[in-house]
Image (cartoon, rainbow, N blue to C red):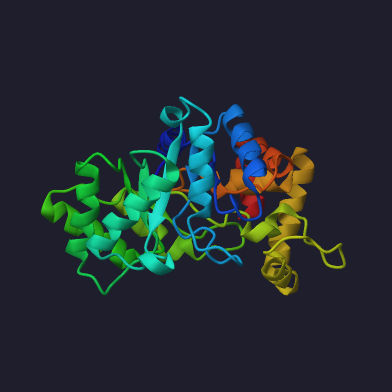
Amino acid sequence: MTLSDNIQNQTAFGPLVLGGNVFGWTADRDASFAVLDAFVEAGGTAIDTADVYSEWADGHSGGESETVLGEWLAARPGMRSTISIATKVSMKSDRKGLAPENIRAALDESLERLQTDYIDLYYAHRDDDAVPQDEVVTAFAELVADGRVRQLGASNFTGERLRSAVTVAAAHGVVGFTVAQDGYNLVRRDYETALAPTVADLGIVQLPYGALQGGFLTGKYRAGGDAVDSPRAGNATKLLDDERAMRVLEALTGVADARGASMTAVALAWLRQQPTVGAPIASARSTEQLAALVESFDLVLTDEELAALA
């Protein structure tokens, strides 16, 4: 995928996709509304959520993020046509897997929570090899044919299974997956060898999650530094004992300082400029956190800066 391909993909999804995993969880309704308003005001156009968000939190059952997003849309008449919404199926406890009837039922529930009649991008959140792939592919394609979904995505698939799904869709003469969503960032680089060649060969757009490695790439976690109030702090602080991760952090700090930019913005810009990537996904639980995400919108790293982070 060439630089021109990246530019086209970024036009389709914007420079950054706002992650909705925090809505109704670490960001309450008011904070979520404020982040969403600020994101749109800054020029953001794409929002990512899932039916399972935030089932993991005490007292939650999933659907909280979609519900908050739906309430925001309902309170902002006319906003729906200007915003691209992505959501997912297969990981929510009462909607696990990719059986066709489960896909259809999950979509109905997501549409109700989101208070909309269509989804711009609907993902298989995780592969399900217990269901024949032709059944999965045709079930998703029917949603597009019905006009309830506009584009299809696959998250957390292996390269082999992703290629197979695209091949099956072509054999059936139906629309298939055109977007992938997988973990990828300056620290987490396995995507580059395990999946990127397949994604590039298939002409699929990658919208990577985990762009800031749980906050580690923001620079707020430092050895001997103050404790960080975040549910991801435990995993992020473990990287302080990882020599390679610390070398990445040092290089990131150097580029950010020389550029006069935040480490967050540089990490997101680096990811956006990688082959196959349309836009990174990152979340913010406050407008203060969102500011660094917005800073990345117009930041383009030089070849020298990219090389320093390689």
Q: Quadrant of the C terminus?
A: bottom right
Seen from the viewer's position, the closer of residues 80 and 306 is 80
Classify 225 as above or below 305.
below
Give how far across and how far down residue 258 sits, in percent.
78, 42
Q: Is residue 192 left or right of residue 252?
A: left
Identify the residue at horizontal 25%, vertical 53% (top origin).
140
Q: Residue furthest left?
A: 172
Give how far across and how far down residue 14 sits, in percent.
50, 35
Classify 64 as above or below 258.
below
Classify 259 as above or below 131.
above
Whether residue 298 is visible: no
Q: Is residue 230 left or right of residue 180?
A: right
Give the image quarter of residue 32: top right
Whether residue 182 is visible: yes
Identify the residue at horizontal 30%, vertical 43% (top origin).
149
Classify 199 as above or below 79.
below
Give the image quarter of residue 290: top right
Give how far across and how far down residue 108 sits, in percent.
32, 50
Q: Residue furthest top?
A: 78
Q: Quadrant of the N terminus?
A: top left
